[in-house]
Amino acid sequence: MAERTGIQWTDATFNGWWGCTKVGPGCDHCYADALDRRTGGAHWGSGVARRRTSAKNWSEPRRWKPGTRVFCSSMCDVFDNEVPEEWRHDLFELIRATPHLRWQLLTKRIGNVPDMLPEGWPNGFEHVGIMATIVNQDEADRDGPKLERVKALGTTWVGVSYEPALGPVDWTAFAPFLNWLIIGGESGHGARPFSLEWARSAIGQARALGFAAFVKQFGAKPFDQIITPGAVTSRDMRLANKKGGDWTEWPAELRVREFPAALSLAANAEPSPSSHGGV
């Protein structure tokens, strides 16, 4: 919807429509649903009509500068079963027509992707990556093979949004195909706790397994563990930034914001001390 955004791992957001249906624990406190309701909308739920955005909004990405990373879609899901097929066709035509951009498609329906990609994929879509939201080990076990299938279709890069992280995850099975892992705690009303140990583990696995890691935020309820002989205790962290997104408040070893090679050279990239090209 906007050429600029506060989301740390992208430069811009685009939404061809608003609306979705909650499909898992990561959706419980959906910020997009809450924003939709606050602005007078009612576009969430099974059987509820989605709202297509304006023609002006659809024209904007064509004017964005080369290399801009574009998160699509923050207020919907590209691979939502209840979206009219012609809307998705129009979106992919827009994406095909903007090879100067770096499109980041994030979905909670990774199993739908192979059947909803345009014919001839990935020809004409080499500037596109696809990410799955995975928030706990159960989802990792279920959706990892589906994401691997998406990569096997020739997709330039694939990633995981481990946000909101709701438990520790073993990412070993993702090593052969994963390019990027975004890590984050939950913010906003009803936010659930986020352990810094989950982030440390994810970063360590990324280093060992060969994919890029990006810690977005700690969320509203981060806690750390204090390990002493014979005991492990938890300590809540009190951060000035309500979303836990100011990394100057973080332990140094967690200040990790890396991009996969296909995104690291984007025009608006702001290199961090730990940035690298990834895989």
Image (cartoon, rainbow, N blue to C red):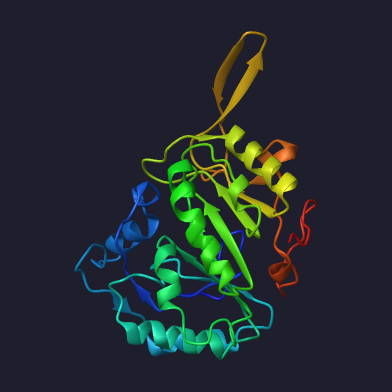
Residue 57: tell me if it is visible: no
Residue 62: tell me if it is visible: yes
Specify whether 256 is left or right of 84.
right
Specify whether 209 is left or right of 44.
right
Q: Nearer the viewer, residue 166 or 74?
A: 166
> Eyeballing the image, is 268 above or below 31?
below
Residue at (70% x, 71% y) in the render: 262
Q: Position of residue 96 (x, y in %)?
A: 55, 88
Q: Nearer the viewer, residue 46 or 64?
A: 46
Residue located farthest toward the top when viewing the structure as drawn: 230
Residue located farthest toward the left when viewing the structure as drawn: 47
Residue at (71% x, 56% y) in the render: 258
Q: How many marks?
A: 0
> Eyeballing the image, is 70 above or below 204?
below
Specify whether 256 is left or right of 233.
right
Q: Position of residue 213 (x, y in %)?
A: 67, 52
Quadrant position of the C terminus in the picture: bottom right
Q: Position of residue 32 (x, y in %)?
A: 37, 60
> Eyeballing the image, is 72 above or below 26?
below
Q: Quadrant of residue 23?
A: bottom left
Q: Position of residue 6 (x, y in %)?
A: 56, 61
Q: Quadrant of residue 252?
A: top right
Residue at (53% x, 55% y) in the render: 161
Specify whether 118 is left or right of 100.
left
Residue at (42% x, 38% y) in the render: 192
